[in-house]
Image: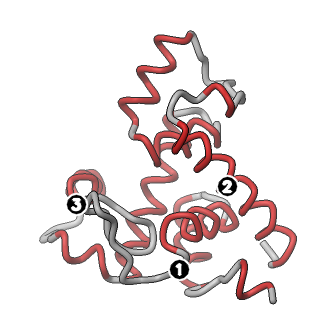
Amino acid sequence: MRTLVYPLEYDYIVREYARVNGVRPSLVAAVVLAESKFKDNASSHRGASGLMQIMPETGEWIAEETGMVGFKPEMLNDVSTNLRMGTWYLAYLLREYDGNTVLALAAYNAGRGHVDEWMKEYGWDKNFSEIDSIPFSETREYVKVVMQNEEKYKELYEF
């Protein structure tokens, strides 16, 4: 039953890239579940690809930041590449927001620009935790779902 509702495909790869990037594997799994339900060929109407639903422009930026040579957007459909890049990006956002999971997840969903704008406009600091104050309803729900998913992954798997 647990694997139907809270699957953990690519367990080894999720755990390895989480370890390499210093991110909780339960959080990575929760993001993947919310983004693609662990469907490696997932794509969005906005152009995001793969397990962690990375936009091509974000993939190019991550490739530059990490020194990845020869990046092409179609590489985002490769399970290992997508998890490596998505986990690195999640770790980057957690560092940007001083470990604040709410802000990092909001930025993963809505973009850093929006989160930085909200912080400025609403006077949020990096201790922000009021999910219901997030202006975009899609992002608000996304953060709630990912955080709930993470709690379930912690309960069901040995993280």
Q: In this view, does 27 lie above or below 138?
A: below
Q: Which is more toward the observer, 111 or 83?
A: 111
Disc 3 designates what residue? 56
Q: Mark 2 points at which residue?
A: 145
Give the left or right position of residue 65, taking residue 93 as reference.
Answer: left
Left or right, 66 with respect to 42, comes to: left
First along the sequence among labels 3 and 2: 3
Alpha carbon of mark 3 to alpha carbon of mark 2: how far?
Answer: 24 Å
**Which quadrant: the C terminus?**
bottom right
Instruction: From the top left corner, tell me how far across and down residue 18 is, in percent.
Output: 58, 67
In the picture of the structure, the residue carrying the numbered disc 1 is 38
Residue 103 position by quadrant = top right
Residue 46 rendering spot, x and y as whole percentages: 27, 57
Residue flagged by tag 2: what amino acid is it?
Val
Q: Is mark 1 on a helix, strand or loop?
A: loop
Q: Residues within 10 Å of mark 2 (few under 14, many from 20)?
A: some
CB within 8 Å, label 2 to label 1: no
Of mark 2 and mark 1, the one earlier in the sequence is 1
The secondary structure type at the circle numbered 3 is: helix
Q: Quadrant of the N terminus?
A: bottom right
